Image (cartoon, rainbow, N blue to C red):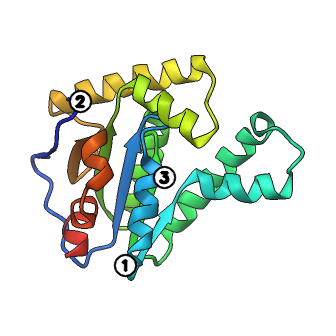
């Protein structure tokens, strides 16, 4: 589905109302452009929209522990980020935009369950980027993940894409949009947020 754009129907699930509480997941391989897309969304300063990204936690922890290499901080970054995600989902913020690789089945289940318990509609915006392009994105940002971890992400991402192609999906999403890297660079805000923004 590389380079494709379009929504995949989810039979039996209703379209979220424009004023409903929502979770928008921007998913993709590490280096695919998730954080860049989130920054574009947040730059528009849409009322009621909050972004949650592990980079926000990483920046704070790197500032507090500047002498430690990131590989030592990574487990703490992930733990703090995940707690923060669950707190924000349970809170009063109308629209949560979460960036996540979306390649971990257990974490997808936790996030989707938390969103449903909070009464949130779920929209997935998946950035379909090749592992090679994602690796280039990691180099641009100045921090690459280990090759073995990237291979695991890529394998799980491929399985997720196959499930979407077969219309079985990752489960629990009301709306799924898949965009290629080029399209993601200029995707309109309304296409990221769907009916939530409009």
- Image quadrant in which you'd find residue 174: bottom left
Q: Which disc, if any, is residue 35?
A: 3
Q: Mark 1 points at which residue?
A: 46
Q: Which of marks 1 and 2 is nearer the N terminus?
A: 2
Disc on the earlier residue, 1 or 3: 3
Which mark is on residue 20? none
Residue at x 37% of width, y 28% of height: 157
User: In the image, residue 136 lies at what x, y percent?
Assistant: 48, 30
Question: Quick one: SS at disc 3?
Answer: helix
Q: Mark 2 points at which residue?
A: 2
Describe the element under mark 1 as helix, strand or loop. loop
Where does residue 46 sit, x and y in percent of width and height?
Answer: 37, 78
Q: Is residue 98 left or right of residue 187?
A: right
Q: What element carries label 2?
A: loop
Percent x, y of residue 104? 47, 33
Label 3 to label 2, Cα distance in Å? Answer: 20 Å
* Quadrant that contains the N terminus: top left
Q: Residues within 10 Å of mark 2 (few under 14, many from 20)?
A: few
**Badge 1: how crowded within 10 Å, few (<14), some, or many (20+)?**
few
**Label 3, residues with CA under 10 Å away: few <14, some 14-19, many ≥20:** many
| Residue that sits furthest to the front in the current view | 140
- Picture quadrant of residue 17: bottom left
* Lower position in the chain sequence, tag 3 or tag 2: 2
Question: What distance separates the C-alpha of mark 1 from that of mark 3?
Answer: 17 Å
Q: Is residue 147 left or right of residue 182?
A: right
Residue at 38% over, 82% down: 47
Residue at the image point whose x is 43% and y is 71% from the top = 43
Report the front residue among 22 and 115.
22
Q: State the separation of the CA atoms marked 1 and 2.
A: 29 Å
* Left or right: 79 as drawn, with respect to 15: right
Q: Where is residue 48 in the image (x, y as percent from the top left)?
A: 40, 80
Which residue is situated farthest in the bottom direction here?
47
């Amino acid at each position: 589905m590389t380079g494709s754009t379009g929504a995949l129907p989810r039979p039996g699930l209703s379209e979220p109302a424009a004023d409903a509480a929502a979770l928008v997941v921007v998913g993709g391989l590490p280096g695919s452009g998730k954080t860049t897309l989130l920054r574009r969304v947040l730059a528009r300063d849409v009322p009621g929209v909050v972004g949650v990204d592990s980079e926000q936690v990483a920046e704070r922890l790197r500032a507090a522990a500047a002498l430690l290499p990131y590989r030592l901080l990574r487990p703490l970054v992930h733990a703090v980020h995940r707690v923060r995600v669950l707190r924000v989902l349970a809170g009063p913020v109308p629209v949560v935009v979460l960036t996540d690789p979306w390649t971990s089945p257990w974490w997808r289940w936790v996030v989707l369950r938390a969103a449903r318990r909070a009464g949130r509609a779920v929209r997935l915006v998946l950035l379909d980027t090749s592992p090679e392009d994602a690796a280039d994105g990691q180099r641009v940002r100045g921090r690459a993940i280990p090759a073995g971890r990237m291979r695991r992400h890529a394998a799980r991402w491929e399985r997720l894409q196959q499930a979407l192609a077969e219309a079985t999906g990752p489960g629990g999403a009301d709306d799924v949009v898949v965009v290629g890297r080029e399209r993601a660079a200029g995707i309109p805000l309304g296409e990221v947020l769907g009916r939530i923004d409009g």
